């Protein structure tokens, strides 16, 4: 008789644990982690305790603090040194597909990236410019066919933060990714 109670009790407890786990991870309850959170946690959970030199490994400190509340201090797109006006971009065979002011976390969540910069706070405002090109573009002196180029700039300082280059041509990145 006691054995049945233990089995039934264990089944009820297991069901309760599964229910709590489902609720905590269910998008319906607002606990669906963002892509930024998933990448950040994954990296933090896999940092080795020491590097090849035996020294402790630490994430870089935040050099770009959150500034979401300082919208009046942010640069306009035309004030970003690397911004190319639409007319000039058209001459180079390009067209903007995105010109957006957003937080760094929104940028990571919206792109197909596998990594993040730990020195940028997730609530730091950034300018994201994505252009699609039908003419050959040269990246580091190498031709890229049918390029899609996304550049990221700090919205407060105008500092260039990153560039991502993809191609709609299956062989479009061949020269750029070729090892010498």
Image: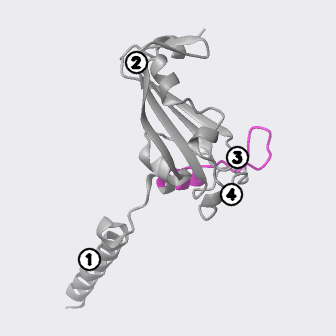
Q: CA distance from mark 3 to mark 1?
A: 52 Å
* Badge 1 or badge 4: first in the primary sequence: 1
- In the displayed orientation, state which residue is furthest to the bottom: 1
Residue labelled with disc 1: 15
Spatial CA distance of label 3 from label 4 is: 12 Å
Between residues 50 and 43, which one lies in front from this camera angle? 43
Q: Magenta segment, which residues? A: 38-58
Which residue, given by chain and number where applicable, does mark 2 sit on?
A: 146
Q: Mark 3 or mark 2, which is nearer the start of the sequence?
A: 2
The earlier-in-sequence mark between 3 and 1 is 1
Question: Which of 67 and 34 lies nearest the eye of the viewer?
Answer: 67
- The residue positioned 29% from the left and 75% from the top of the image is 19
**Point 51% across, 11% down: residue:** 143
Q: Sort mark 1 into few (<14), some (14-19) or many (20+) by Cα contacts within 10 Å.
A: few
- Mark 2 near mark 3, Cβ–Cβ under 8 Å? no
Q: Secondary structure at mark 2?
A: loop
Question: Is 14 part of what is drawn in magenta?
Answer: no
Above or below — where is 151 with respect to 101?
above
> Secondary structure beneath disc 3?
loop
The residue where tag 4 is placed is 65
Element type at marker 4?
loop
Q: CA distance from mark 2 to mark 1?
A: 53 Å
Crowdedness of circle 2 by 10 Å Cα count: few (<14), some, many (20+)? Answer: many
Going from N to C along the chain, the mark reached first, 4 or 2, is 4
């Amino acid at each position: 008789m006691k054995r049945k109670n233990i089995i039934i009790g264990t089944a009820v407890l297991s069901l309760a644990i599964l229910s709590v786990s489902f609720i905590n991870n269910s998008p319906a309850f607002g606990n669906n982690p963002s892509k930024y959170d998933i990448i950040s946690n994954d990296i933090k959970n896999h940092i080795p305790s020491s590097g090849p030199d035996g020294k402790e490994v630490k994430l870089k400190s935040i050099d770009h603090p959150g500034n979401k509340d300082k919208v009046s201090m942010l640069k306009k797109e035309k004030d970003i040194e690397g911004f190319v006006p639409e007319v000039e971009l058209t001459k180079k065979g390009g067209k903007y597909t995105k010109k957006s002011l957003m937080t760094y976390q929104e940028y990571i969540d919206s792109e197909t990236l596998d990594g993040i910069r730990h020195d940028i706070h997730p609530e730091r405002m950034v300018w994201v410019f994505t252009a699609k090109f039908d003419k050959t573009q040269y990246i580091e002196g190498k031709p890229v066919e049918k390029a899609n180029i996304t550049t990221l700039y700090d919205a407060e300082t105008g500092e260039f933060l990153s560039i991502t280059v993809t191609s709609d041509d299956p062989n479009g990145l061949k020269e750029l990714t070729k090892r010498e």
